[in-house]
Image (tube, grey):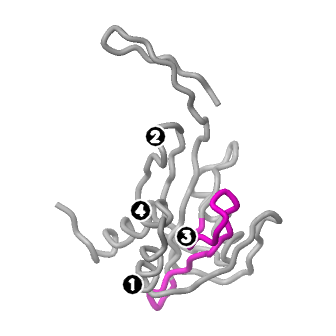
């Protein structure tokens, strides 16, 4: 937690900010077009969450290297190709976290290596089925929805003006 002092229109405000840094999220695409997701038990919300693989960028690590590492750890797939799709602020109202989103293709299964504290299972799904299931959960995981939106834009499946 860090306190930041803001001045605006002659007034002064103090805000507490969660200093988080950078993280990554990865949309892994198999050759047949299906995507690899994880279902992870998230203690803060006491439920299973269907999401894209993701993780924190460690000190001295490049986001692309984090994406490759997290993909193997959480799904067991190694990406031969990684494409940057975009970056977002996850919760700019109270945190400085920036999430970098990647598309992973030309996947090769090498075996999962989850952290000992991670409770997760891999799910391989068609995009339509994944979206349907994610949207049926209330609430759903924001990073996953944004990552899949960027994936659809990249694949030409969705256009915006």
* 3D distance between C-alphas at marks 4 and 3: 11 Å
Which of the labelled discs sits on residue 51, or is there none?
3
* 3D distance between C-alphas at marks 1 and 4: 15 Å
* 3D distance between C-alphas at marks 1 and 3: 14 Å
**Answer yes or no: do the residues labelled 1 and 2 have beta carbons within 8 Å?**
no
Please give left or right for residue 79 compared with residue 127 in the image: right
Residue 49 magenta-highlighted? yes
Name the residue rendered at 46%, 38% in the picture. 93
* Secondary structure of residue under mark 2: loop
* 3D distance between C-alphas at marks 3 and 2: 21 Å
Residue at the spot of label 1: 128
Which of the labelled discs sits on residue 92, or is there none?
2
Name the residue rendered at 55%, 70% in the picture. 51
Magenta range is 30-53
> Is 17 located above or below residue 146 in the figure?
above
- Estimate how packed mark 1 is, as few (under 14), some (14 to 19) or many (20 or more) residues with alpha carbons within 10 Å: few
Nearest to the observer: residue 133 or residue 101: 133
* 3D distance between C-alphas at marks 1 and 2: 29 Å
Which residue, as the protein is rendered here, is positioned at the far left?
161
Residue at the spot of label 4: 146
- Quadrant the C terminus occupies: bottom left
Nearest to the observer: residue 103 or residue 119: 119
* Secondary structure of residue under mark 4: helix
């Amino acid at each position: 937690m860090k306190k930041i002092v803001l001045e605006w229109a002659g007034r002064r405000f103090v805000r507490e900010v969660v200093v988080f840094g950078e993280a990554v999220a990865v949309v892994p695409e198999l050759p047949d077009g299906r995507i690899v997701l994880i279902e992870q038990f998230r203690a803060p919300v006491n439920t299973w969450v269907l999401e894209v693989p993701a993780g924190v960028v460690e000190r001295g690590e490049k986001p692309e290297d984090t994406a490759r590492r997290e993909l193997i750890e959480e799904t067991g797939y190694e990406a031969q190709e990684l494409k940057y799709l975009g970056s977002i602020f996850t919760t700019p109202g109270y945190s400085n976290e920036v999430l970098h989103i990647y598309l992973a293709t030309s996947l090769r299964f090498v075996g999962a290596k989850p952290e000992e504290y991670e409770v997760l299972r891999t799910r391989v799904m068609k995009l339509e089925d994944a979206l349907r299931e994610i949207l049926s959960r209330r609430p759903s995981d924001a990073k996953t929805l944004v990552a899949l939106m960027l994936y659809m834009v990249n694949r030409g499946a969705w256009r915006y003006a």
